[in-house]
Image (tube, rainbow, N blue to C red):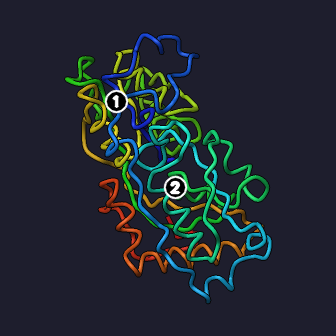
Amino acid sequence: MKTKIIAIPSVLALGALSITACSNPDEKPAAAGTSSSSQTSSDLSFDTSSIQAVPEIEALVPESVKKAGTLKNGASIDYAPAEFFKSDGKTPTGYDVNMADAIAHVMGLKGATTEHAEFATIIPSLGSKFDVGISGFTITADREKEVNMISFIETGTAFAVAKGNPKHFDPTHVCGTTVGVQNGTFQFDYITQLSKECTDKGEKAVTIMPHDLQTDIAVRVASGQYDATLADSPVIGYTIERSEGSLEQVGDVVESAPQGIIVSKDNEQLTKAIQAAVQYLMDNGYVEKILSTYGSNQGALKTAQINPQV
């Protein structure tokens, strides 16, 4: 849960992706936008242009952000449907990207800019390179020590395997398997804990294969290099839908937890402005509409909390 989990290049049609091009573990997959995804799958976006500024929320925005005129968002843009590139391979979209724009409009800004960054680098870049990070960040007590977190969606974690589960992966007994996860995510910590439980019982550890990009993991699962991957349930579901039959979910959704927008602890004013904007978007149905665009509205929360107890 960045919780993050399975993205596909340009909402990647895995069946159309060249698996052999990614046989080298250190080789990156083709750039987003190179597959023949349809307009409806790769260019989904919620139009936020009609969302109006709310004066009382606009008054909360720090002067430095007002002067810039835009909200600078950092995201690992490889994680459909939360964040991915449109078919042009350049334009970010996804429900996290739309949320950044919607928040910016409520705050009286021109909009948001979402720039790609490797997931593990986003928190250290807050306050300098980015104003916020909206990129599937699962809210945890440890993260709340580092940054302020504003909740807006709740997701779970799920495993995906190659279609037909040819390696007979059992999500209730992962000892001795090879699982791909993204660096810096809740899933990395979760599978690490499961692996420790295996060794504590005298069984084989999980071979954990960390990557900076979720797209790299998806192709390796589909090609049989890894037994499974672990990721956010909306991401798993969306990935499977777009994989042209290459992947499927195994087991139940587990470890349900809220995700949130991260802001530097040094910027309490911006934190309060973001919280107010998110609550406005919740109260007026925008969060559900944004998530519904990508089939994920079931996880919409009703209250935007700053650093909720988890």
- Eyeballing the image, is 298 above or below 33? below
- Eyeballing the image, is 286 above or below 207? below
Mark 2 residue crowding within 10 angstroms, few (<14) / some (14–19) / many (20+)? many
Q: How many marks?
A: 2
Rendering coords of residue 77 (x, y %): 54, 42
Q: Secondary structure at mark 2?
A: helix
Dividing the picture into quarters, in which one does residue 229 lie? top left
Q: Is residue 137 rendered to the left or right of residue 294?
A: right
Mark 1 residue crowding within 10 angstroms, few (<14) / some (14–19) / many (20+)? many
- Eyeballing the image, is 178 above or below 79? above
Q: Residue at x 38, y 44 (%)?
A: 235
Q: Residue furthest left?
A: 164
Q: Residue at x 41, y 55 (%)?
A: 45
Q: Residue at x 73, y 66 (%)?
A: 265
Give the CA distance from mark 1 to mark 2.
21 Å
Q: Which residue is mark 2?
A: 97
Task: State which tag comes first along the sequence, 1 or 2.
Answer: 1
Rendering coords of residue 40 (x, y %): 31, 46
Decide if residue 202 is in sight here: no
Decide if residue 152 is in sight here: yes
- Eyeballing the image, is 88 above or below 225? below
Q: Is residue 184 rendered to the left or right of residue 197?
A: right
The residue nearer to you, when weighing 146 against 94, is 94
Rendering coords of residue 48 (x, y %): 47, 67
Q: Amino acid at mark 2?
A: Val
Q: Residue furthest bottom?
A: 56
Q: Is residue 50 rendered to the left or right of residue 175?
A: right
Rendering coords of residue 41 (x, y %): 33, 43
Q: Which residue is mark 1?
A: 13
Q: Secondary structure at mark 1?
A: loop
Q: Amino acid at mark 1?
A: Ala
